Image: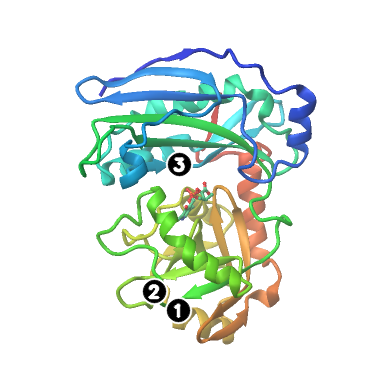
């Protein structure tokens, strides 16, 4: 595997400071992008080459480019946080790099070396460092590495050319309104992923597959959809863009990785953060019947969703064809908020980092 170096070509006119500060005051999620991006090409026989840090801007693609037809695409999401001393650190970029390799294998794409993935993220953040929001709040710089198949032609086969890129976007709260409990539509018929499919790959097709159910949930007044397994329609898997946790007093449980849900890095981090805080954490199957019954009998005290973009978001209401119930009285639960604060404190550099997760530029 070749490891290309990234050539610096930062020739754009950076956003004016006043314009940037206005955006950083209220960034939203995924609406504004920084001044630059990194691109690296892969060609069969040559491997990875032409790593460049260039002005942010459109790609020109032939209409017959394979990604436009057969969706051979993968992506990642990770965040850079301003530290108390003004420096910047990325949260677990190596974990994202490894998941990117695993998604690439599933989608018959070339694997980008872990060190190149991290170097590309570092180079972009270093160049556009003024876009990293100030220390103190929950804002961060969200990085979106992705790879597309760029071969031109309509044959259905793994492409012989790819483009890897990283773009960056200042991020505030993923859900408008900050930390408030979200409502969940429990889909008992539409599924997100099937055994042997690509549910554990971070590929655009999984998100395309989730949009209709998401629109149906919105029509029912819900923020998000929770998916069940595709075989028995019984076991809780995850949301369209977040994993789930169930809080039983001082034990937290997350659905085990079956191959049809995404191995979230926030999910994985919380298994450790919970233990650090004296809770027990466990991965196992949770059925929809258990979710409803244990809420009703009071043993299931809180439910929350977690992911890079949304951090930790309490679940307030669950609606399904079988009825509707409130989770922890519709309020953010105590354990949920303790875990949220503990994770954010590590990310913002105000708590110790016992697992060595923060990667300083
Ligand atoms: N599940 C899905 C389908 C996602 O898109 C995401 C977001 O990345 C997650 C779970 C959470 O993963 P992570 O914590 O790595 O962001
Ligand atoms: C993330 O949390 O990084 C995601 O990818 C979720 C969503 C924005 C697709």
Q: Residue at x 35, y 62 (%)?
A: 193
Q: Cβ of disc 3 within 8 Å of ligand 2?
A: yes
- Disc 2 versus disc 3: distance between alpha carbons? 26 Å
Q: Answer above or below: position of 37 versus 352.
A: above
Please state the horizontal and vertical placement of residue 136, each as a whole percent of the image.
75, 39
The residue nearer to you, when weighing 295 against 204, is: 204
CB atoms at circles 3 and 1 under 8 Å apart?
no
Neighbor class of circle 2 (other Cα within 10 Å; few <14, some 14-19, many 20+) is: some
Q: Name the residue that disc number 1 marks.
A: 288
| Residue 245 visible in this rendered orientation of the protein | no
Please provide percent x and percent y for residue 129: 64, 24
Kindly indicate whether the residue at mark 1 contacts the one at mark 2 (C-beta within 8 angstroms).
yes
Residue under pointer 2 = 235
Colour theme:
rainbow
Q: CA distance from mark 3 to mark 1?
A: 29 Å
Front residue (pair 13, 232): 13
Q: Along the polypeptide, which appears first: circle 3 or circle 1?
A: 3
Q: Secondary structure at mark 2?
A: loop
Sort mark 1 into few (<14), some (14-19) or many (20+) by Cα contacts within 10 Å.
some
Q: Are marks 2 and 3 in contact (CB under 8 Å)?
A: no
Where in the figure is residue 274, as x and y percent of width and height? Answer: 54, 56
Q: Does residue 50 appear to the left or right of 53 in the view shown?
A: left
In the displayed structure, would residue 269 be above or below residue 209? Answer: above
Is 155 positioned to the left or the right of 333 in the image?
Answer: left
Answer yes or no: is residue 152 visible: yes
Q: Residue at x 35, y 24 (%)?
A: 41
Above-or-below relation of 143 to 179: above
| Disc sitting over residue 76 in the figure | 3
Q: Which mark is residue 135?
A: none
User: Residue at 49% across / 38% down in the picture?
Assistant: 92
For the image, the number of numbered tags is 3
């Amino acid at each position: 595997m070749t490891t290309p170096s990234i050539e610096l070509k930062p020739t754009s006119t950076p956003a004016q400071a006043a314009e940037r500060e206005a955006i950083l005051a209220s960034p939203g999620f995924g609406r504004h992008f920084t001044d630059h991006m990194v691109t690296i090409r892969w060609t069969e026989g040559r491997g990875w080459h032409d790593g460049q840090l260039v002005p942010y801007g459109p790609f020109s693609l032939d209409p017959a480019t394979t990604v436009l037809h057969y969706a051979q695409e993968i992506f990642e999401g990770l965040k850079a946080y301003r530290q108390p001393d003004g420096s910047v650190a990325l949260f677990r970029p190596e974990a994202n790099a490894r998941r990117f390799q695993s998604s690439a294998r599933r989608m018959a794409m070339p694997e980008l070396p872990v060190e190149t993935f991290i170097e590309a993220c570092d180079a972009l953040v270093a160049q556009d460092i003024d876009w990293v929001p100030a220390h103190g709040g929950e804002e961060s710089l969200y990085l979106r590495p992705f790879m597309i198949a760029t071969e031109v032609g309509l044959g259905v086969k793994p492409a012989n050319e790819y483009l890897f890129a990283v773009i960056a976007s200042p991020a505030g709260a993923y859900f408008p309104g900050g930390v408030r409990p979200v409502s969940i539509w429990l889909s008992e018929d539409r599924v997100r992923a099937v055994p042997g499919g690509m549910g554990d790959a971070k590929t655009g097709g999984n998100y395309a597959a989730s949009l209709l159910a998401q629109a149906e949930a919105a029509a029912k007044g819900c923020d998000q959809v929770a998916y069940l397994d595709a075989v028995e329609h019984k076991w809780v898997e995850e949301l369209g863009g977040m994993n789930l946790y169930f809080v039983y007093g001082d034990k937290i449980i997350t659905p085990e990785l079956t191959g049809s849900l995404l191995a979230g890095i926030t999910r994985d981090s919380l298994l450790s953060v919970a233990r650090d805080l004296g809770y027990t954490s466990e991965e196992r199957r949770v059925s929809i019947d258990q979710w409803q019954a244990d809420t009703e009998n009071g043993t299931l005290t809180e439910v929350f969703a977690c992911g890079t973009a949304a951090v930790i978001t309490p679940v307030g209401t669950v609606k399904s064809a079988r009825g509707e119930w409130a989770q922890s009285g519709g309020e953010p639960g105590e354990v949920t908020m303790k875990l949220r604060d503990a994770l954010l404190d590590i990310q913002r550099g105000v708590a110790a980092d016992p697992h060595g997760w923060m990667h300083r530029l």
